Image: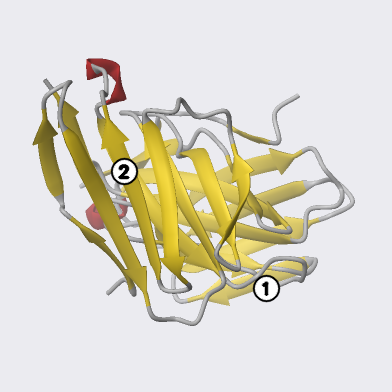
Amino acid sequence: DTEVTQTPKHLVMGMTNKKSLKCEQHMGHRAMYWYKQKAKKPPELMFVYSYEKLSINESVPSRFSPECPNSSLLNLHLHALQPEDSALYLCASSRQGGSSGNTIYFGEGSWLTVV
Amino acid sequence: QKEVEQNSGPLSVPEGAIASLNCTYSDRGSQSFFWYRQYSGKSPELIMSIYSNGDKEDGRFTAQLNKASQYVSLLIRDSQPSDSATYLCAVNRGNQFYFGTGTSLTVIP
């Protein structure tokens, strides 16, 4: 079983809604990630938090807003999304990078449908 | 040039055969190498990690790394229908993990 927990597993939202995806890990990892994955495509990096600070933002539209309240939690706030944002959103975590042996572990994902 | 390249397949093998999956990467500074399995509609699941040149075996799975050739492979022995999935190759540098596009494997009973 994955030690990265994501909620909700499924979310349907309208284009004017505001919702949030949540992620929690208890492995003591200090790097946390949001990925977006469309069907038959590899995971696409959105954001990386390192020691609770945003370290990488892959030019993601502002309608996606990440938040890292503490070292175990990661949120993704969603507002004014478009139907093309419908995808599987994956949270992941890893030890702080920079050395061999750094492994990324994924949560089960949140399926988002924008209507 | 893509960071990680995989043959997208699809790859079909009969049950009991050896499935061979290949991956190349572009940056010699890559530190760690991984194979993830992803069933349709599910998240990626780590099946193998390898950090140094050579082979690493875990049950029916063997990962091979050749840093000089910038090549990583995964062998699945005695393939089972339950191995049918997409296999993602990934490499790590610092806090960045780069994924290949995945190879779709079908094991035919």
Is residue B44 visible in the rendered image? The answer is no
Q: Considering only order in the chain, which callout, 2 or 1, is on the residue closer to the N terminus? A: 2
Residue drawn at point x = 50 percent, y = 39 percent: A46
Q: Residues within 10 Å of mark 2 (few under 14, many from 20)?
A: some
x, y percentage for residue B74? 56, 55
Residue linked to disc 1: A101
Q: Give amino acid for label 1.
A: Gly
Report the disc number at residue B93: none
Of residue B62 and residue B29, the one placed in the foreground of this image is: B29
Q: Secondary structure at mark 2?
A: strand
The quarter of the rendered structure image containing the N terminus of chain B is: top right
Apparent side of residue B42 relative to residue A45 in the rendered image (left or right): left
Apparent side of residue A1 relative to residue B58 in the rendered image (left or right): left
Residue drawn at point x = 42 percent, y = 47 percent: A66
x, y percentage for residue B9? 46, 29
x, y percentage for residue A91? 38, 54
Apparent side of residue B109 relative to residue B106 in the rendered image (left or right): left
* Chain at tag 2: A
The quarter of the displayed image where residue B34 is located: bottom right
User: Alpha carbon of mark 1 to alpha carbon of mark 2: how far?
Assistant: 31 Å
Residue linked to disc 2: A77
x, y percentage for residue B79? 36, 57
The quarter of the displayed image where residue B92 is located: bottom right
Q: Give amino acid for label 2.
A: His
Relative to A6, does residue A21 appear above or below in the rendering?
Answer: above
Relative to B1, does residue A36 appear above or below in the rendering?
Answer: below
Residue drawn at point x = 29 percent, y = 47 percent: B84
The quarter of the displayed image where residue A85 is located: top left
